[in-house]
Structure formats: structure tokens, C-alpha cells
Image (cartoon, grey):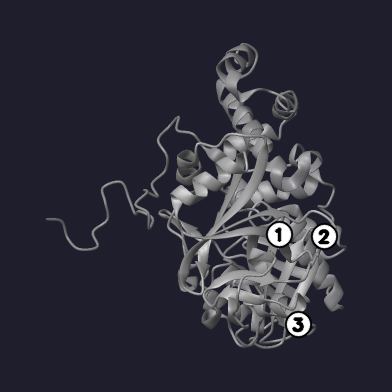
């Protein structure tokens, strides 16, 4: 048995067990491979791969290796794949000019969300410079710079920092964005009007749910925020409300119906202790200065409203209930019902045609009678899997319907209806 704390034969290791010893001769160097893409040869090779088909990668690689080094071809193909993936977040115009790492594509903020956050800094007033800590590949720094804000972008990983630097240059923003490779905990943020911190929320085993296990921890990020005139901390949308610092305004942001993140805002221009739900692309916002009382519960009416996920995460469903003169169908279920039509960016509305106790045979008979061939399945408070239900229904016919598997006043229930797409 070896000595406790004895170094392994090839030198010290990192927390995930990887050796810090120098790479063997000939081993791949990701930073060197990336820098090769920045040469005229690498840039020309990458530009020619904009529309390449990944399914033809072997043939493409074989062809390109006749005139280019194999290592450069491999790096270019990898970057081309990342750019194709990044189009969904950054749009084609930017994505095909930018550079990415696999983690950078996965963790980067999409442009619409980053732009909204930058606009909030601008609207707060007096923010001319921001220290962007844990900047990643630079998505947030880009949005801030495009809003006219000078940015110090900091990341401790040399490759990531170099990618962020390349992105600033590629988009013509290097005059506003300074990229620094450093430990964010050692950065003096006092010269800046605001601080933005995006802690790493993924580890070797996937997503990290404990805010104190973020890197850096939420407690450190909060301390950095409280030292600045204004600050924003990007956190996972599932954060428990009790973990939110009392000095913060908490905002949940959805885009296209999907909750993307939560942000804690500190300082001048933000309301400590308040809750906000923002729905993009409409940029519509619900806000409450304090927790709302529990909404009423009652029978299912003519309409059912499904609140946006950001509204649910922000605990603002009661606001929707009041706006549509409605009620919950169950005290534990975030479905709102009303006898009145209600249209807003915060909800999706359905007109309910049938209500049944949970019974697969009755549902199958009703769908057959209505000639339903396309069934949308939504569920809250039910263990039934939508794909399994659709399989068992043996759907046939030209019509469409939506079924909600849920609870009404504690009882398992099926509600059948159709989306409200216009005036009722």
C-alpha cells in the first residue's frame, strides 16, 4: 500500500484523476490545434467546410488530407461540426464566423438571452463597463459589447480564453472586449461598473445542482456581486427559492417556451427580494415584490391555461390566476382554468371539450369516435409516459386533439381539448 498523499509516478493529478505531467511527445495539444485554425491555411480550410455533410466526413477527410496535414484537417472538421451545432444559439451569421469548444457550445448562453441580460444592464443606467467572470467562449461578452459596454472577459482555461479572444476579433468587437486568462477569484473588479458571473454548473458527472458546488461557489459569486455597484449571477433555473440571497432580485428567463436560466441581480436599479419571469422573444415580464398568496382552487372551466415555465419557476402562477379571473384545478398542479378567454405571452390556452376520470379504455373509445389521428399528450401529476399512451390508443383519423393527464381536486383525470389559436 502506498503512502497517503504520495504523488503518482508520473506527477500530480487533477481532481478528476488526470495527470498534470507533460503530454507525451506527439500527443494532441488542443490549444496548438486551435491556433493552427487561425493561420491563413487553417482559416481557408475551415471556410470551405461551412456546408459540409457530417455523414460524408470520412470521404471529406480523405480528400482534404491529400493537400493538408492530417492534424489540421481533424481540427477543421471538428470546428465545422461545432459551428453547425452553434447555429441554434448564435444564428448562422455569427456561428460561422465564431470558434467553439465542445463545452463552449453546450454551456454558452444563446444570443437572445444574452442580449436581454445586456439590455437590463443598460436600462439600469450608468453601466459602461462589466467584468465578465467565467466568460467561456464569450457569448455574454459579445452581447454586452454590442450594447456599447466595455468588457473584461476572464476565464482560467487557456484554450477557452483564446477562443473568446478569437470570437471578439472575428465579430469586430476586440476594441471593446479584453480577454484575460486568469483565476476569477484573483481579479480586482473595482474599476468596473458591474460584475457578471457565470459559474460552471457541470462537473465530471454531469449537471451540478448544489449551488455551493458550482465553480466558483454561489457564496463566492454573491460576495463578489455585493462588492460591485451592480451585478448579475447566472444560475440554474431549478435553484430553490430559499437559496436565493435576500439582497437579490431573482429573474427566470424562458425563450421559445423553454426555461433557459435564472439570474440574480444585485445593486442599483434592481429590487432586492423580488421575483421576475421574463418570456422571450416577446420580452414580456411578470414581476412581484414579494411571494404571492396561494391562488384559489376550483372546478375545471371552459378554458385551461398552461403557464410558461419561467412563470412557474418564479412562483408567479397566482398572478396568472388573477389576470384571467381563474383558479387552479388542483392546489399542487400548475394548470389554471377559467370560464373566460385570456390571451397573453405568459400562457398557452386550450378550450376543454371533455373531462374523464383516468381510464385508458374510455379515452381510446372517445378518440376513435372523434377520429383523432394526431394526439398531443401533456401531463402534470401523472406517471404515464406520453409515447406509451399514444401507442396504446392506436390512433387513426384526420383530426387532432390534446389530452392532459393530471389531477383535478386530487383525483387522476383526463382533460381533452384543443389549442386556442384565435378569438373564441
Q: Which mark is residue 351?
A: 1
Asked whether 307 or 146 is in front, the reply is 307
Residue farthest left in this picture: 1
Determine crowd level at label 1: few under 14, some 14-19, many 20+ residues with C-alpha closer than 10 A. many
Q: Which mark is residue 406?
A: none
CB-based contact (under 8 Å), mark 2 and mark 3 = no
- Give the label, 2 or 3, closer to the camera: 2
Where in the figure is residue 405, as x and y percent of width and height? 52, 58
Where in the figure is residue 192, as x and y percent of width and height? 76, 74
Q: Earlier in the sequence, mark 2 or mark 3?
A: 3
Q: Which residue is mark 3?
A: 270
Where in the figure is residue 200, as x and y percent of width and height? 54, 61
CB-based contact (under 8 Å), mark 1 and mark 3 = no
Q: Earlier in the sequence, mark 1 or mark 3?
A: 3
Residue 238 figure quarter? bottom right
Determine crowd level at label 3: few under 14, some 14-19, many 20+ residues with C-alpha closer than 10 A. some
Q: Find the distance from the CA under tag 1 to the CA under tag 3.
A: 38 Å
User: Quick check: 192 above or below 38?
Assistant: below
Amino acid at each position: 500500500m502506498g503512502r497517503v498523499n504520495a504523488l503518482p509516478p508520473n506527477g500530480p493529478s487533477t481532481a478528476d484523476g488526470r495527470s498534470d505531467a507533460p503530454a507525451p511527445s506527439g500527443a494532441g495539444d488542443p490549444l496548438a490545434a486551435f491556433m493552427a485554425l487561425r493561420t491563413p491555411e487553417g482559416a481557408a480550410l475551415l471556410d470551405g467546410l461551412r456546408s459540409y455533410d457530417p455523414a460524408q466526413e470520412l470521404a471529406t477527410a480523405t480528400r482534404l488530407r491529400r493537400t493538408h496535414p492530417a492534424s489540421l484537417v481533424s481540427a477543421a472538421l471538428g470546428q465545422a461540426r461545432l459551428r453547425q451545432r452553434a447555429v441554434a444559439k448564435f444564428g448562422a451569421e455569427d456561428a460561422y464566423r465564431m470558434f467553439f469548444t465542445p463545452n463552449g457550445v453546450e454551456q454558452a448562453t444563446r444570443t437572445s438571452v444574452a442580449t436581454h441580460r445586456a439590455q437590463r444592464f443598460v436600462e439600469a443606467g450608468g453601466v459602461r463597463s462589466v467584468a465578465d467572470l467565467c466568460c467561456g467562449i464569450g457569448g455574454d461578452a459579445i452581447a454586452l459589447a454590442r450594447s456599447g459596454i466595455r468588457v473584461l472577459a476572464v476565464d482560467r482555461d487557456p484554450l477557452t480564453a483564446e477562443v473568446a479572444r478569437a470570437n471578439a476579433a472575428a465579430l469586430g468587437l476586440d476594441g471593446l472586449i479584453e480577454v484575460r486568462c486568469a483565476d476569477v477569484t484573483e481579479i480586482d473588479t473595482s474599476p468596473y461598473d458591474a460584475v457578471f458571473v457565470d459559474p460552471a454548473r457541470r462537473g465530471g458527472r454531469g449537471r451540478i445542482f448544489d449551488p455551493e458546488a458550482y465553480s466558483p461557489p454561489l457564496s463566492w459569486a454573491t460576495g463578489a456581486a455585493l462588492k460591485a455597484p451592480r451585478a448579475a449571477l447566472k444560475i440554474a433555473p431549478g435553484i430553490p427559492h430559499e437559496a436565493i440571497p435576500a439582497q437579490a432580485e431573482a429573474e427566470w428567463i424562458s425563450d421559445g417556451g423553454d426555461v433557459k436560466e435564472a439570474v440574480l441581480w444585485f445593486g442599483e436599479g434592481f429590487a432586492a427580494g423580488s421575483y421576475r419571469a421574463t418570456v422571450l422573444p416577446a420580452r414580456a415580464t411578470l414581476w412581484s415584490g414579494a411571494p404571492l398568496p396561494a391562488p384559489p382552487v376550483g372546478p375545471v372551466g371552459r378554458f385551461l391555461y398552461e403557464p410558461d415555465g419561467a412563470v412557474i419557476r418564479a412562483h408567479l402562477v397566482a398572478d396568472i390566476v388573477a389576470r384571467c379571473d381563474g383558479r387552479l384545478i388542483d392546489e399542487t398542479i400548475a394548470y389554471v382554468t377559467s370560464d373566460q378567454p385570456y390571451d397573453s405571452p405568459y400562457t398557452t390556452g386550450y378550450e376543454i371539450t371533455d373531462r374523464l376520470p383516468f381510464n385508458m379504455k374510455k379515452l381510446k373509445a372517445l378518440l376513435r369516435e372523434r377520429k383523432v389521428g394526431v394526439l398531443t399528450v401533456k401531463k402534470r401529476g401523472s406517471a404515464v409516459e406520453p409515447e406509451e399512451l399514444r401507442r396504446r390508443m392506436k390512433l387513426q383519423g384526420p383530426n387532432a386533439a390534446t389530452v392532459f393527464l393530471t389531477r383535478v381536486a386530487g383525483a387522476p383525470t383526463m382533460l381533452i381539448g384543443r389549442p386556442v389559436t384565435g378569438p373564441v
